[in-house]
Image (cartoon, rainbow, N blue to C red):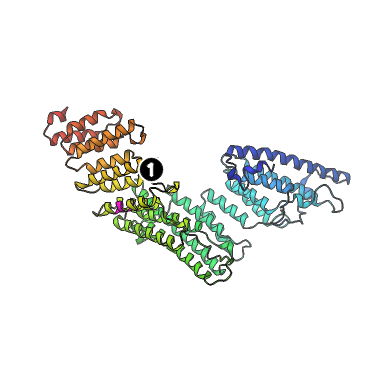
Amino acid sequence: IMEWSKLWGRNRHQQSASQEQVIRGVSLVHELAMNILRIGEKELDKYFDSVGVKTDSPERFKNHRNFVTKPDEGKNLNVESICRVIALGWSRCDGSVAKDAAYKANNLLVKLEEISHKRQKIPSERKVSFQLSDVAPTPSFYNHVLSCWSRSTDSNAEIEAKTLLERMSLPLETYARPDVFSYNNLLNLHANRGNVDKAEALLKKMDEPDHTIPPDAYSYTIVMNAFQKKFTTSGSERDMKDPTKAEELLSRLVKKFEESHYSDINLRPTHVTFGTVLSMYAAADRILKEDMSRGDVTRKWWSRNILSGADKQKMGWGAENAERILEWMIALKEKGKRKTVGKKDKTDNNPVDDLILVNNRHFLTVIDAWAKAGKGVMGAIRCERLLERLENLYQSSGGDPKLRPGPKHFGAVIDAYSRADDRESTAEHAEKFLDKSEDLFLHSTNPNDALSNIVYNLVIDAWSRRIGHKSGERANEVLRRMIKNYKQTKNPSLRPDVISYTGVMKAYVTHPDGGKEALQILDEMKEQFKSGNVNAKPDFKAYAVAIDACVRNGLSIEAERLLDELDDSAKNQTIFNTVMNGYRIEGRGQEAET
């Protein structure tokens, strides 16, 4: 049993077992454990038969439980610990696949309780081969079963979980009292089923002064994650107030931790806790744009999500708040540093110092939020400032690798400037950050720092949005630079793809020789595809851009030739209209009619 348990134990990730293997393993050892319990039950029944006590009904032993296990018990290898390991295994199984996992774990608990009841009736001087402490379920066992119910897809899961929790709360009903893990499992059940209101109500109940089990940091995190899941899942139930509600929970948690004078580590929020709220705000602008673009937006939705506050009418509201949460995290971290200054005992770990571990992922989330917030140059400038802030923190930390800016951070700033096409210098700014990215990462041996064609494509796109004859040349220079770096480094991620070439053709559309240049680039794409670069194969958009460039430069005959190369299934009315319009401009009505 213990050998099989390695598939779902503490070091389970080293085993690389599939869900099917885990379920098969737990099912096998479950039957072995039931055999052990039957042997123990027969031994008990034999004793009771010898003293003339009938054991036909388990009810005979009900409500006589004066033995309560403690969390630190059950560390030795005994019957209870074996069954507990199996219950843990069932809790690690996907409830949608192993649909009976929770029932099996619950049945194992009930059987162990029955054996414990019988063992408790035997006088201590009349010993059998095992003690009551060998079989009495511990709190961890009950919590593993509750965890199974929290993951179960069964319609009765909530009822079963609440029933078990209520039994644990009543004297003489179970061998263990509920703890915060027990209630967290019930919170998880509500969160997994999308019942945010129930999860929030339970957390509020746990927060009441007369509740015997107060919530911990994980309790708050579960409910915050429930809000996040609801917010990021598309549907009419999504509410733009969800990030604010999650932040209110975070504020309550931080306040309670501060009131404990930073001594209660169970209430200590982590960077993950803050990261949940930060990521919700970071996604808010994108989600708002998606919802506003839907055709089924009602007045009720508009009133709830847009007109509920003046700030929410502005795009960038989410990025602004995400940056505010990031600043909050940094301030708390700095507060922890100030509290540890001057301490002689270097082994003294200050909880405030460990409160928030701000890392480069948090910065990337906020930078990306500003890049996609639709705020133009202002958003790009905010991205640039955040990157500078991260670089300064990295330097002041003495080179903490968790604060080291990476290619994705520079790529997000480049993305922001490529989208901000309402100022002439945006393309130059994007290329400036490409230069810096090459200086830092082009020849890096760290695979996490490898550059890709994405940042080059973004700069090419920035040039393609610029009006002017030089845009095509500048975009083409970036493409040639990417090809040169690909050949130098042999980095497959730097090989140009269809997006790279199409972007350059797009930049040439308004160029005096744009048609000729587009045709040459399209031919290069075909040659690249023939030589093995499958990602360079021209698609419909590539042909459409090349046709547009030809038409704008009086090469409608070439445009029609490209139209003929397209598969009939890819052709549409727009592409035909483009070619006909070119012939019209050139005064060639007969070709247009043909």
Write the residue at 24% across / 44% down. Answer: 507
Relative side of 443 to 85, left or right: left
Q: Is 216 placed above or below 338 here?
A: above
Q: Which residue is mark 1?
A: 489
Residue in front for this viewpoint, 171 or 423: 423
Q: Is residue 49 magenta?
A: no
Quadrant location of the C terminus? top left
Write the residue at 88% across / 45% down. Answer: 52
* Residue 563 in view (yes/no): yes
* Residue 90 percent coordinates (x, y): 63, 43
Residue in front for this viewpoint, 61 or 544: 544
In which quadrant of the rendered view does residue 39 lie? top right
Q: Main secondary structure of the magenta part?
A: helix
Write the residue at 26% across / 37% down. Answer: 521
The kind of residue on which mark 1 rests is Thr
Q: Is 558 placed above or below 306 here?
A: above
Chain part drawn in magenta: 429-433
Q: Residue furthest left?
A: 587
* Residue 486 percent coordinates (x, y): 35, 41
